[in-house]
Image (cartoon, rainbow, N blue to C red):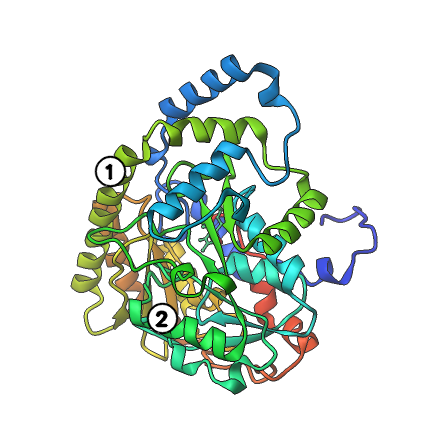
Amino acid sequence: MTEGQVSPPLAQRARALRSSVIRDILKLTQRPGMISLAGGLPAPDTFPLELLRAGFDRVLTEHGRAALQYSTTEGHPPLREWIAARETARGIPTRADEVLIVSGSQQALDLIAKALVEPGAPVLVEAPTYLGALQAFSLFAPTWRMVPTDDGGLMPDALTTDLTQSARFLYAMPNFQNPSGRTLTHERRSALAERARRHDFWIIEDDPYGELWYEAVPPPSLRAFACERVIRMGSFSKVLAPGLRLGYVIAPEPVIATLARLKQATDLHTATVTQMAAYDVLAGGHLDTLLPLTRRRYAQQCAALLDALDQFFAGRGHWTRPAGGMFVWVELAATVDATALLAQAVKRQVAFVPGAAFYPLGARANTLRLSFVTVAAEQLHVGIERLARCLDEPVAHAATHSETDPKVDAANGAAAASASPRNDDASRAPAANR
Ligand code: PMP
């Protein structure tokens, strides 16, 4: 707020959302010449511009004003049918009544937070996890419980009675996770479902990247293992275009009914004409030609980034080798502070997101997320070389890098969690949190 401007008295949840240092640094990434590995945006060349143009045109011609009218909260019936049929074809029988169309899966996170997060009650998340989910959930001040991960993703064995006690749900991304790029194996999916049943918690499965595999289709959705207690979220942002703001939830009917009531209070329904136009493209079978192109392109860019890391980062740390998706996660020597490194990197015209942003507590300051899909292969190479040079400068090793924030631990209540520096990070620059 600039001087002289006034604000109404804010509710506690709005006061808790603050800007962050990283956000200010990332503003600089808009500068010309910057190689930004910080964004989480899909490559615009993959957006089916002409197909959508034709889709909107056809819908407005064929449906006229009905396409511009209010419609049902649950979503455009043919689109719900299409999603249910696709899920069924993958071996998980699904009815259209089990599908809710939402305005981007970010809205699903908001609705799920409103439906399930009780102030002070524990929420289980992977460490690290998606920043946008931390934002959505933290508005309702949960207590965070971190589920440890390794190169195979979250570790189901860590889901003990102690860790899961009183937790209503676990939020997880089994495919090409944001930010780590990791994928949960078939065995771990099955073990996770077993733990969920044993300790009686639900699973929120967030899967916006599942279609973006490079070589092989990932293991089945968590619904295949525990259909009765999984709320699955999907999105058209990475397979069509994020500006459509179209996503969906698949869950048992009573859950859909609750989320639909909450959605009614939020925005009545998702844009009618947009749902119809997207359905026009999907029903035309175009995903079958679009997806292979996107997969190949992202696989090539991922390979280019990994080559650059192998060349310039050898001996400096450890990084993931994703089998799909848009992100690589790097863990550097314990002495490196990635936020200090970012400040240096921006001076050298390269940017990334410091990994601390993706932990609600106990942030690992020596981690970072690299997004590679909007940067050309040669530029990825230049960017990683520049970053390696920054690592040779002493400032990147200067600041604090505590593995756990002593003020906050999993046993602390919501008040402690919301007072933690991590909640500031939950209001990050839009491009970075995608
Ligand atoms: N979940 C995850 C894991 C994401 O990475 C994103 C955005 N990148 C979203 C949800 C939100 O996607 P959208 O609202 O565009 O569907």
On screen, residue 308 versus residue 110, left or right, reads left
Helix, strand or loop for disc 1: helix
First along the sequence among labels 1 and 2? 2
Q: Which residue is drawn at 22% across and 66% down?
A: 313
Q: Which residue is drawn at 63% across and 37% down?
A: 269
- Where residue 253 sits: x, y (%)? 58, 52
Residue count near mark 1 (Cα–Cα under 10 Å), binned few <14, some 14–19, many ≥20 = few
Residue 293: assigned label: 1
Contact between labelled residues 2 and 1, with CB atoms less than 8 Å apart: no
Helix, strand or loop for disc 2: helix
- Compared to residue 91, the image places residue 333 above or below, namely below
Does label 1 point to a residue whose CB lies under 8 Å from ligand 1? no
Residue tagged 2: 190
Amino acid identity at mark 2: Ser
Amino acid identity at mark 1: Leu
Dividing the picture into quadrants, the one containing residue 150 is bottom left
Dividing the picture into quadrants, the one containing residue 398 is bottom left
Residue count near mark 2 (Cα–Cα under 10 Å), binned few <14, some 14–19, many ≥20 = some
Q: Which of 92 and 258 is in front in this view?
A: 92
Q: Can residue 5 be seen in this view?
A: yes
On screen, residue 309 versus residue 201, left or right, reads left
Q: Which of 155 and 87 is in front in this view?
A: 87
Q: Which of 425 and 110 is in front in this view?
A: 110
- Where residue 286 sits: x, y (%)? 32, 30
On screen, residue 37 versus residue 229, left or right, reads left
> Furthest residue to the top?
61
